Image (cartoon, rainbow, N blue to C red):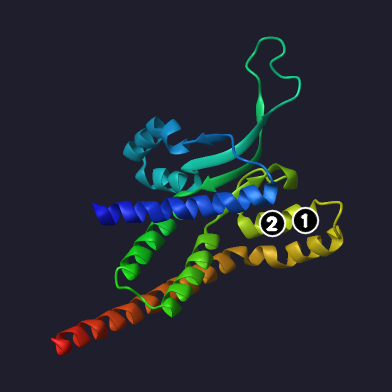
Amino acid sequence: MKVSVQILTTFFITVFACLFLVVVATQSFPNHISFEMMNNIGLYLDLLYSNPSTAVKLWLQKPLVIIQKTAVLEGSGITGETPLSTQIWGLYIMPLSAIVWMAQSAFIILIMKMSPSLNIKIKMLMASMLLTISVFYVRVQACCTESPGWVLDVMILSRVFNPLLNTDYWEGLYSAISPWFNIMQLLLMSVSLIVFYFCFLASKKQSAKKTNRSLVSR
């Protein structure tokens, strides 16, 4: 039970870290959260019963949770109807994000229980940052994205649509590297997992040495 709480706490810390970065970048706070999976749970269950493969594909493509900043459209609701709102930005927790961040949290707790050295903790922190970024999805209205995208994709695209910057440079850069975004995500994820694995092995070896020293001293 205690380990489960620690894993969940680490998971939520990861989510809040991503949210903090978006808040800093947009200089605005979220004011709405929607649990997309719960809103459409009936549809997913019916589809899972009738067509499991399609249900899984649809589930992987849809966000579980959206933490977002919304604003009421000017002029809406003045005649008594429900005011319309638009999304300014949104942090999308996709199924892949949730799975990866939860696994990452479990790795962190497992390694921390072995009392790793400072060097291992630093490597684990760097691996956590890379792994978090690899499945970090956002949507920003200012850069005209119709759907959530990978954070690096959205960051560069927002500069393409920024008239205060050299848009030709950013447009050229985006065109050159955008086909490689999926590979970059996979590479970041792979490197992170490899570092986590070696951190685990080093911590396990270090823990075994401490145990042997303790037995010898007795």
Q: Nearer the viewer, residue 18 or 183?
A: 18
Question: Most extreme residue toward the bottom, as rendered?
Answer: 216
To which quarter of the image does residue 51 belong? top left
Q: Could you tell me residue 97's position as x and y percent?
A: 47, 54
- Which residue position is annotated with label 2? 155
Q: Nearer the viewer, residue 95 or 179?
A: 95
Instruction: For label 2, count other residues whose C-alpha is less than 10 Å away and answer few (under 14), some (14-19) or many (20+).
Output: some
* Amino acid on which disc 1 is placed: Arg
Q: Is residue 149 visible?
A: no
Q: Residue at x 53, y 67 (%)?
A: 130
Instruction: For label 1, count other residues whose C-alpha is less than 10 Å away and answer few (under 14), some (14-19) or many (20+).
Output: some
Q: Is residue 56 visible?
A: yes
Classify mark 1: helix, strand or loop: helix
Q: Could you tell me residue 35's position as x and y percent?
A: 46, 36
Contact (CB < 8 A) between labels 1 and 2?
A: yes
Kindly identify which numbered label has been placed on residue 169.
Answer: none
Which quarter of the rendering shows the C terminus?
bottom left
Question: Most extreme residue toward the top, as rendered?
Answer: 80
Q: Residue at x 57, y 68 (%)?
A: 183
Question: Most extreme residue toward the front, as rendered?
Answer: 218
Q: Residue at x 65, y 51 (%)?
A: 24
Give the Cα distance between marks 1 and 2. 7 Å
- Which residue position is annotated with label 1? 159
Q: Nearer the viewer, residue 208 or 183?
A: 208
